[in-house]
Image (spheres, rainbow, N blue to C red):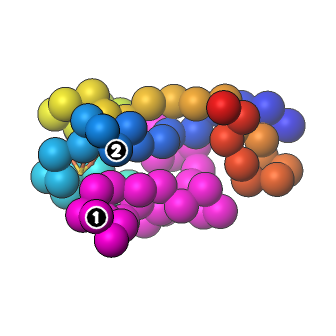
Amino acid sequence: MACKRIRVNQAKCISCGACIATSPSKAINFDETNKAKVDPTIVTAEDDICVDVCPVEAIELVEFDETTKTYKK
Ligand code: SF4
């Protein structure tokens, strides 16, 4: 089923950690480059609130396939 889920634009991320502290599902962590990254296997619609806490608008809502847990673009 199609819906939208958050994803981090790592080119914009300044590694502040706000989204990681906010994510209800704990779906966001820093990757090996110290940029925030969303785990698509556990992200939920509740994580949409993370869009509002990012100071540099690095978190976007992207078309997502709930069945395969993958982003569509
Ligand atoms: S809130 Fe934004 S800038 Fe901060 S770690 Fe998350 S994505 Fe990066």
Q: Which residue is mark 2?
A: 10
The residues bearing labels 2 and 1 have C-alpha atoms spaced at a distance of 10 Å
Q: Is mark 2 within 8 Å of ligand 1?
A: yes
Q: Give the percent coordinates (x, y) of residue 14.
A: 16, 46
**Quadrant of the image occupied by residue 31:** bottom left
Is residue 32 or residue 20 the one in the foreground? 32
Residue type beneath disc 2: Gln
Is residue 66 shown above or below 40?
A: above
Q: Which residues are magenta?
A: 24-49
Q: Is mark 1 within 8 Å of ligand 1?
A: no
Q: Position of residue 50 (x, y in %)?
A: 35, 42
Instruction: Look at 28% across and 56% down and name the residue there.
Output: 35
Q: Is residue 52 left or right of residue 40?
A: left
Residue 54 drawn above or below residue 69: above
Is 55 located above or below residue 42 in the figure? above
Q: Count of labels shown?
A: 2
Query: Left or right of 61: which side holds 52?
Result: left
Q: Which residue is mark 1?
A: 33
* Front-lying residue, 24 or 30: 30
Q: Are marks 2 and 1 in contact (CB under 8 Å)?
A: yes
Mark 1: give few (<14), some (14-19) or many (20+) Cα within 10 Å: few
